[in-house]
Image: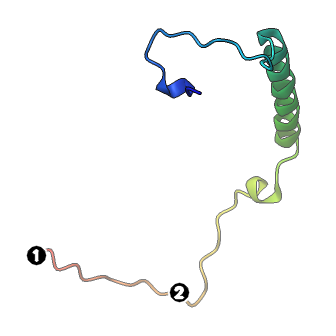
């Protein structure tokens, strides 16, 4: 059996007996997209606690600035 990627450009594949009609495939794609849209809309309405917390983190009290020697001179 020839795989799709092995066909020269412009060739048409013959249909196999178990192929589903394009209308069935398109309807399945529409259903899956609708389910994904519903999930993403639900996820956007309820943000996770980590994404809702936009405050700056405080530096530890014992942190001291450090000067690095890069040797670029």
Q: Who is closer to the viewer here, 11 or 62?
A: 11
- Residue pictured at 16% horizontal, 80% vertical: 71
The residue under label 1 is 73
Secondary element type, mark 1: loop
Image quadrant in which you'd find residue 23? top right
- Residue pictured at 86% horizontal, 37% vertical: 39
Quadrant showing the C terminus: bottom left
**Residue 28 locus on image (x, y percent):** 84, 21
Q: Who is closer to the viewer here, 4 or 2?
A: 2
Q: Who is closer to the viewer here, 31 or 68?
A: 31
**Residue 30 locus on image (x, y percent):** 82, 19
Q: Is residue 50 above or below residue 28?
A: below
Quadrant showing the N terminus: top right
* Mark linked to residue 62: none
The residue under label 2 is 63
- Residue pictured at 70% horizontal, 56% vertical: 54
User: Label 1 to label 2, Cα distance in Å?
Assistant: 28 Å
- Residue pictured at 43% horizontal, 17% vertical: 8
Q: Who is closer to the viewer here, 71 or 67?
A: 71
Secondary element type, mark 2: loop
Q: Is residue 38 above or below residue 49?
A: above
Asked whether disc 1 touches disc 2, contact meaning CB atoms under 8 Å apart, the reply is no
């Amino acid at each position: 059996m020839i795989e799709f990627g092995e066909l020269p450009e412009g060739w048409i594949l013959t249909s196999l007996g178990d192929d589903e009609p394009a209308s069935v495939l398109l309807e399945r794609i529409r259903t899956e997209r609708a389910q994904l849209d519903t999930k993403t809309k639900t996820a956007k309405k309820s943000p996770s606690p980590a994404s809702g917390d936009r405050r700056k983190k405080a530096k530890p009290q014992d942190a001291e600035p450090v000067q690095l020697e890069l040797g670029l001179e």
